[in-house]
């Protein structure tokens, strides 16, 4: 089985006019994806779910001036991620990346394995990068922008200083140089990053109350977990998963109790 991406790879993106064209297409796609996802999640999950189950909300209502600033930094971040996207495309085109399209039977195994390996590597990279960014001498230079949002909303999900956006955006172009990855896995990773970032910032807990006892969901970050990071700074550094926080004893001691409070109705 094969599907064809010749149309995408047949243009020479190192030519300035082609570089700019694909860059603007990616920029628009990345930024509109952020706006659409943040808005939809806020309207449908934060508002509707929050009305039906108020105890699931971590804090009330979003602040418009804060949202405007978050949208501005997300736009700057989209520029950085757009450049990273074109660089990745050029790597692929030049044959230096390990991205591939043709499927073989081996992919039945390799697609799920490479997806989880990529998530694990990303988690490890981000956890330690995040801890470094919280060093007193480092935080005030760029990571403080993300923490200007004390009470987060889905619009906080992509709001970073451009330097931090750069440190995040280099991850995938570097990873595809070393890890053989099907194009579908790359798309799945981008979707996972976008959706988990919104889930973790939206200010409403969506995971079920039994998640703490689940061998899978217990390791997912979620809104309550990441909200504690924004409230307390020096705990809960995880990106998708909680295992580094558990292993390094940086998970907030009150997390489980707070999770329970936001997942079960008292009425
Ligand atoms: Zn932080
Ligand atoms: Zn955050």
Image (tube, rainbow, N blue to C red):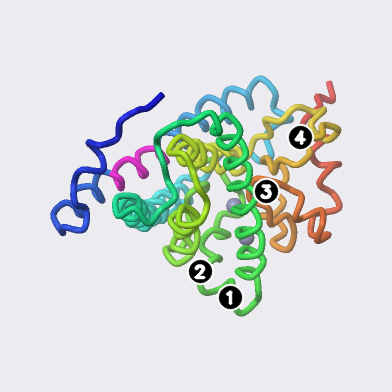
Residue under numbered circle 4: 216
Q: Nearer the viewer, residue 167 or 258?
A: 167
- The circle drawn on residue 226 is 3
Judged left or right of residue 213, residue 3 is: left
Residue 32 lies within the magenta run: yes
Tell me where residue 261 appears, x and y as whole percent: 82, 35
For the N terminus, give its image quadrant.
top left
Query: Callout 1: few (<14), some (14-19), or many (20+) C-alpha neighbours within 10 Å?
Result: few
- Circle nearer the viewer, 3 or 4: 4
Residue 58, located in which quarter of the rendered image?
top right
- Mark 1: which secondary structure? helix
- Circle nearer the viewer, 4 or 1: 4
Q: Earlier in the sequence, mark 3 or mark 1?
A: 1
- The circle drawn on residue 138 is 1
Q: Earlier in the sequence, mark 4 or mark 1?
A: 1
x 21%, y 53%: residue: 13
Q: Nearer the viewer, residue 222 or 153?
A: 222
CB at disc 3 and ligand 2 closer than 8 Å: yes
Q: Earlier in the sequence, mark 4 or mark 2?
A: 2
CB at disc 4 and ligand 2 closer than 8 Å: no
- The circle drawn on residue 142 is 2
For the C terminus, give its image quadrant.
top right
**Residue 138 vertical placement versus 55 (above, below):** below
Farthest residue toward the front? Answer: 105
Tell me where residue 142 appears, x and y as whole percent: 50, 69
């Amino acid at each position: 089985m094969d599907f064809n991406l010749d149309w995408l790879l047949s243009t020479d993106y190192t030519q300035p006019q082609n570089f700019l064209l694909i860059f603007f297409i990616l920029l628009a796609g990345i930024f509109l994806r952020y706006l659409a996802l943040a808005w939809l999640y806020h309207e449908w999950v934060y508002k509707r779910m929050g009305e039906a189950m108020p105890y699931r909300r971590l804090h009330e209502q979003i602040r418009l001036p804060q949202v405007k600033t978050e949208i501005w930094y997300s736009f700057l971040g989209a520029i950085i991620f757009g450049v990273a996207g074109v660089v990745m495309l050029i790597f692929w085109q030049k044959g230096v990346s390990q991205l591939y399209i043709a499927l073989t039977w081996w992919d039945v195994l390799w697609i799920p394995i490479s997806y989880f390996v990529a998530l694990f590597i990303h988690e490890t990279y981000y956890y330690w990068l995040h801890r470094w960014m919280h060093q007193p001498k480092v935080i005030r230079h760029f990571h403080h922008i993300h923490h200007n949002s004390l009470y987060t909303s889905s619009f906080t999900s992509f709001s970073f200083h451009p330097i931090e956006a750069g440190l995040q955006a280099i991850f995938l172009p570097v990873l595809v140089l070393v890890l053989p990855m099907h194009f579908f896995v790359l798309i799945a990773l981008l979707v996972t990053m976008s959706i988990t970032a919104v889930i973790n910032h939206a200010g409403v807990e969506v995971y079920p109350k039994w998640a703490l006892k689940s061998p899978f969901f217990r390791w997912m970050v979620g809104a309550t977990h990441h909200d504690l990071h924004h409230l307390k700074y020096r705990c809960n550094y995880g990106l998708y998963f909680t295992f580094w926080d558990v292993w390094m004893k940086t998970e907030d001691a009150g997390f489980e109790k707070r999770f329970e409070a936001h997942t079960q109705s008292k009425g």
